Image: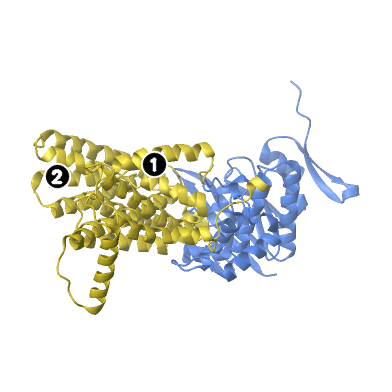
Chain colours: A yellow, B blue
């Protein structure tokens, strides 16, 4: 009997409180690390002075420390938190809608679509903003083509969506290869390759600001609908018998999750594993009920990607692309979880 | 007696062929109706039509006098609880979370179960006698326990009618009877029940009324004693069947004759 008993964390347990304070603690600590050395005491006094100046509405004279902390480190920290939450929420939602724990946010070809958009942006212009915009648009375009293709075969369920996603993804992957093939090998090609591996090194406030809008809208809607995602995991017939308009609900959740993924990818490039592994860790801790699972995924995903980004910008003199670290950390972690049999599915 | 379900000349077509045609019957409050019939006769399809999962091609279904074609999915779910044959959920929900999903038709789009909903959930668990399973993981339970949990989930919808699609088909001998006992108990407490079964004996055990679905149509419908007889059973299943009264149990049984020797 005892092995059938669930061992999920209670919402009031210390572990859960710790889980939700973790991103904030890491956010503060991340201000202290970086290749440009600022002594701990200077960071603290800079933080103190700036918050006082902000509260009193006065402006401080610009210092190098101030610029490094608030124009370079802080936007990057916020971006890491946002991208980590976004990929994890999207992954968890897709896993629920497709009733499949092995689904990642890139299931509907969004990653490849956004990747091609970015390639196109890099080939056509030098504006970082333009690259982001095209990545975002092509990510959404990939999703809509996949949904449209899935809709053609009427009445067919989830599997058709997954197949359409594979088809759309493969088309865009070929287009990425084409873009690499024709790109200028000294200038555009390295940029494309670097973008596809994921990085937050050139993130500024303005990027965070405009991409935060679709990101927060999507995450909010998914959070509001999180009980209904539970019901969708039961399968079409049962969800219908429980009064859920499945076609509409599935579409809304897919669109929101894609919106969020697309915005995240535009900000950071393609970062694998986060959206697949984080929901599993969250499920292991708080259980599969989406009412708890989505908030926990946000906290864990945000913390995980922030840590990874801290590593990426401090470990070596040149930055290590994020996608490399998330895979190097995420894949063994996943293997360990499978071995322990602690994954939240049988 | 209050009429709970009224089905009038219902038909369902899949592709070019009719699965069933001109099916009519009704269920009163607190009565159990058993649908019998061979594999592929459309018993599950009939139940799914009534549950609003499938769209019938003709005829009408009324629940408490209201035509279900005029109701939306969640209004139907408030009146009709559906218990599937089995559930293959991949995620390890606790029994409490799983059963609480029955509250969904009563919740607005953006809300999740509150304290009252959890109270109703616990009442349903108690009603089927599995309160102690509350914290267990649904997917790790035995087939019999899972069937009871799914019945509890349907009860949590607070429906007037319970639909059970072959509730005993995956269960061992003992668990079959346990599930039937719960069904009988629910009927006594006033729940109306429509169930499919492969076992004519189940109709004698719990049924007030029975119907035989065979060859695309409702072959016979009425009191169990009138419907489950030698002639109907033999013709529905295509084998020789004997129905006998067991005197010391005051109950009839239905058994197949010895297989013919070749």
Label 1: which secondary element: helix
The front one of A2 and B133 is: A2
Q: In x, y percent, where is residue B188?
A: 75, 63
Q: Quadrant of the C terminus of chain B?
A: top right
According to the image, label 2 marks what residue? A120
Picture residue at 47% right of the left edge, 56% below the top:
A293
Sequence-wise, the earlier of marks 2 and 1 is 2
Q: Is residue B76 above or below residue B239?
A: below
According to the image, label 1 marks what residue? A330
- Residue B258 left/right relative to B144: right
Is any part of residue A147 visible from this angle? no
The front one of A139 and A342 is: A342
Chain under disc 2: A
Q: Are marks 2 and 1 in contact (CB under 8 Å)?
A: no
Q: Is residue B131 above or below residue B90?
A: below
Q: In x, y percent, where is residue A72?
A: 21, 57
C-alpha distance separating marks 2 and 1: 29 Å
Q: In x, y percent, where is residue B200?
A: 73, 45
């Amino acid at each position: 009997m005892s092995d059938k008993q669930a061992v999920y964390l209670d919402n009031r347990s210390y572990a859960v409180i710790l889980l939700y304070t973790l991103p904030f603690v890491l956010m503060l600590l991340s201000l202290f690390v970086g290749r440009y050395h600022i002594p701990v005491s200077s960071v603290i006094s800079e933080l103190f002075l700036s918050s006082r100046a902000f509260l009193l509405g006065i402006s401080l004279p610009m210092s190098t420390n101030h610029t490094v902390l608030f124009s370079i480190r802080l936007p990057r920290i916020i971006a890491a938190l946002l991208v980590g939450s976004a990929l994890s929420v999207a992954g968890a939602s897709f896993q629920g809608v497709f009733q499949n724990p092995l689904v990642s946010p890139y299931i509907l070809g969004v990653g490849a679509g956004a990747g091609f958009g970015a390639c196109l942006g890099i080939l056509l212009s030098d504006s970082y903003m333009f690259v982001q915009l095209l990545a975002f648009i092509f990510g959404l375009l990939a999703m809509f083509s996949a949904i449209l293709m899935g809709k053609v075969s009427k009445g067919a369920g989830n599997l058709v969506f997954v197949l359409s996603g594979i088809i759309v993804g493969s088309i865009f992957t070929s287009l990425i290869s084409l873009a690499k093939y024709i790109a200028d090998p000294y200038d555009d090609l390295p940029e494309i390759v670097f973008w596809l591996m994921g990085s937050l090194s050139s993130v500024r406030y303005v990027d965070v600001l405009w991409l935060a809008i679709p990101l927060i809208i999507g995450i909010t809607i998914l959070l509001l609908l999180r009980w209904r995602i539970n019901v969708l995991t039961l399968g079409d017939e049962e969800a219908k018998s429980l009064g859920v308009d499945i076609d509409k609900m599935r579409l809304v959740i897919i669109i929101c999750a894609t919106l969020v993924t697309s915005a995240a990818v535009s900000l950071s490039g393609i970062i694998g594993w986060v959206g697949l592994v984080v929901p599993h860790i969250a499920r292991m801790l708080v259980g599969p009920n989406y009412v708890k699972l989505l908030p926990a995924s946000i906290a864990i995903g945000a913390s995980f990607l922030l840590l990874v980004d801290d590593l990426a910008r401090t470990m070596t003199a040149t930055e290590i692309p994020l996608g490399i670290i998330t895979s190097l950390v995420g894949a063994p972690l996943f293997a360990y979880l499978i071995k322990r049999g602690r994954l939240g599915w049988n | 007696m209050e009429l709970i379900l009224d089905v009038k000349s219902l038909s369902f077509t899949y592709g070019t062929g009719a699965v069933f045609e001109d099916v009519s019957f009704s269920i009163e409050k607190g009565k159990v109706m058993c649908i019998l019939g061979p594999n592929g006769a459309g018993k599950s399809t009939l139940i799914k039509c009534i549950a609003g999962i499938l769209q019938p091609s003709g005829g009408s279904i009324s629940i408490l006098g209201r035509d279900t074609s005029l109701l939306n999915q969640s209004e139907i779910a408030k009146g009709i609880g559906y218990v599937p044959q089995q559930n293959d959920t991949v995620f390890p929900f606790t029994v409490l979370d799983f059963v609480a999903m029955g509250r969904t038709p009563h919740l607005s789009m953006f809300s999740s179960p509150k304290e009252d909903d959890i109270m109703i959930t616990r009442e349903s668990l108690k009603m089927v006698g599995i309160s102690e399973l509350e914290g267990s993981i649904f997917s790790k339970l035995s087939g019999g326990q899972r069937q009871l949990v799914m019945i509890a989930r349907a009860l949590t919808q607070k429906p007037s009618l319970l639909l059970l699609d072959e509730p005993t088909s995956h269960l061992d001998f003992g668990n079959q009877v346990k599930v039937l006992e719960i069904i009988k108990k629910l009927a006594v407490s006033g729940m109306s029940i429509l169930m499919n079964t492969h076992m004519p004996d189940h109709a004698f055990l719990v049924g007030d009324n029975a119907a035989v679905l065979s060859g695309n149509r409702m072959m016979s419908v009425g009191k169990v004693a009138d419907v489950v007889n030698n002639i109907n059973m033999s013709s529905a299943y295509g084998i020789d069947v004997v129905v006998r009264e067991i005197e010391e149990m005051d109950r009839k049984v239905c058994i197949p004759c010895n297989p013919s020797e070749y």
